[in-house]
Image (tube, grey):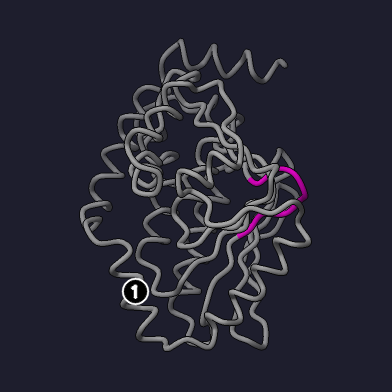
Amino acid sequence: MMENNKGYVRLNIDKNGIGTIEFYHPQSNSLPGEILSEIAKTITEASLNKEIKVIVLKSAGNRTFCAGASFDELIQIENIKSGIEFFSGFANVINACRKCTKIIIGRVQGKAVGGGVGIASAVDYCFATQHASIKLSELALGIGPFVVGPSVERKVGLSAMSALAINADKWFDANWGLQKGLYSEIFQDNESMDKAIDELAIKLSKSHVQATKKLKKVFWEGTDDWDELLFKRAKISGELILSDFSKNAIKKIQKK
């Protein structure tokens, strides 16, 4: 568990064996390297914890799920090594979800950008509200959704992922996400969503552990090379973020 004035990652385990992982950052739940590392670590720990039967992955707040990469950290990347290290943080979260032996339920209460969309795509069953619009804004920053791309494509298909990646300034609404398979169910508000999440989580907590474990393997068939693939993708982003184009694009957004 990580907690300081720059945000937190918390794990709570209830009497039913439901492990809830919640992350928070004061800048719209953006993801600096420290939080990325802690999310990946906490998912891995929850996977190994025999007390936990099912995982719920969520963020704090009401209308923003995750703003993606921390601009404060992106602007500070000055060499390829630190660039790879930062973007590998997203790879590590996706791979932690992929390798996790427990079903992960996602809770998306509001907008998701970039890496936030990647996280939503990496869970096994994703609930969302009508406010959960998504955007892959990376191309507008002079990079691209290289690290999260395979995870998003796995869920919504190449055509839909390409649309998100190319139209980098456009918000795609929650209904679009439902139609394309990113979201499993959408709700009018947090209260009704949380009720449905609780019901499913309790059902899954009573499931045969070995059955859900084997089901996870089936869900993620064909991704055994992702440790290597996502690292290669992190290198691409790590190189591109060093460009003047990217630095200027980030500065413009920070001034708004």
5 relative to 239, above or below: below
Residue at (58%, 67%) from the top-left corner? 56
Q: Quadrant of the C terminus?
A: top right
The image quadrant that residue 30 belongs to is top right
User: Horizontal and vertical percent for residue 57?
Assistant: 58, 62
Q: Which residue is mark 1?
A: 215
Q: Indicate whether residue 61 is drawn in magenta.
A: yes
Residue at screen point 63% across, 60% down: 9
* Residue at x 45% of width, y 43% of height: 180
Q: Position of residue 17 (x, y in %)?
A: 59, 84
Q: Image quarter for residue 217?
A: bottom left
Q: Nearer the viewer, residue 69 or 136?
A: 136
Q: How many marks?
A: 1
Residue 91 versus residue 209 in the image, above or below: above
Taking the image as shown, residue 148 lies to the left or right of residue 120, namely: left
Classed neighbour count for the residue bearing mark 1: other residues with Cα under 10 Å, few (<14), some (14–19), many (≥20): some
- Under mark 1, the amino acid is Leu
Residue 110 is inside the magenta segment: no
Q: Secondary structure at mark 1?
A: helix
Residue 220 relative to residue 123: left or right: left
Q: Nearer the viewer, residue 170 or 93?
A: 170
Q: Position of residue 179 (x, y in %)?
A: 49, 44
- In which quarter of the view is residue 28 placed? top right
Quarter of the image with the N terminus is: bottom right
Residue shown at the point (34%, 25%) measured from the top left: 239
Which span of residues is magenta-colored?
58-65
Q: Is residue 109 left or right of residue 163?
A: right
